[in-house]
Amino acid sequence: MAAKVFESIGKFGLALAVAGGVVNSALYNVDAGHRAVIFDGFHGVQDIVEGEGTHFLLPWVRKPIIFDCHSRPRNVSVITGSKDLQNVNITLRILFWPIVSQLPRIFTSIGEDYDERVLLSITTNILKSAVACFDAGELITYLPAGQSVLLQLPQ
């Protein structure tokens, strides 16, 4: 009699563990300041961006890709030429964050490491074109070391 009770409890426990594993694999969390793009195995990347919270998805068919949407700093150092052809070593600190509505497009066209692939080249080109508008003397007087200055590029 006791053996049958323990056998039925064991079967119930096994079924409960399997059901818990399936439910656990069907839930995912999106932390504060993050967004998720869903990759569907049948349809590709979905256009919907999921916000913060706990979400449900079909396990083994869909996969969430989590993006950090906080503003993050990045330092870019460039050696470039000034207007009077002097070499200038300049470091620019930028703050960047992705546009949330464009995350599916960013993921499909660039990838999860968009900041590593795009920011360096864009920032370098913009910084070189901005520095080329000034003489070396103007850069020294306008850009004191360690201070923040807003540069506007010529149109």
Image (tube, rainbow, N blue to C red):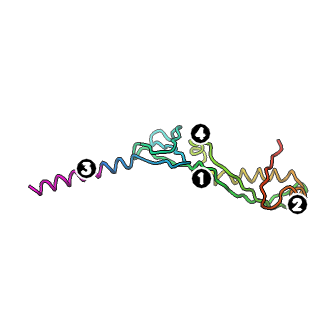
Please give left or right for residue 136 compared with residue 78 in the image. Answer: right
What is the three-letter code of the residue carrying label 1?
Answer: Asp
Which residue corresponds to mark 1? 113
Distance (Cα) linking label 1 and label 4: 17 Å
What is the three-letter code of the residue carrying label 4?
Answer: Ser
Q: Nearer the viewer, residue 144 or 106?
A: 144
Magenta range: 1-18
Distance (Cα) linking label 1 and label 3: 41 Å
Please give left or right for residue 114 compared with residue 24 in the image. Answer: right
56 up-or-down from 125: above or below:
above
Foreground mark, 1 or 3?
3
Q: Residues within 10 Å of mark 4 (few under 14, many from 20)?
A: few
Q: Nearer the viewer, residue 102 or 6?
A: 6
Of label 2 and label 3, which has the lower sequence position?
Answer: 3
Give yes or no for residue 14 being in the magenta stretch: yes
Distance (Cα) linking label 3 and label 4: 41 Å
Residue 101's tag is: 4
Residue at the location (80% across, 61% down)? 145
Residue 86's tag is: 2
Which residue corresponds to mark 3? 15
Residue 54, by quadrant, is top left
Distance (Cα) linking label 1 and label 2: 34 Å
Mark 1 lies on a secondary structure that is: loop
Distance (Cα) linking label 2 and label 3: 74 Å
Foreground mark, 2 or 3?
3
What is the three-letter code of the residue carrying label 3?
Answer: Ala
Give yes or no for residue 106 being in the magenta stretch: no
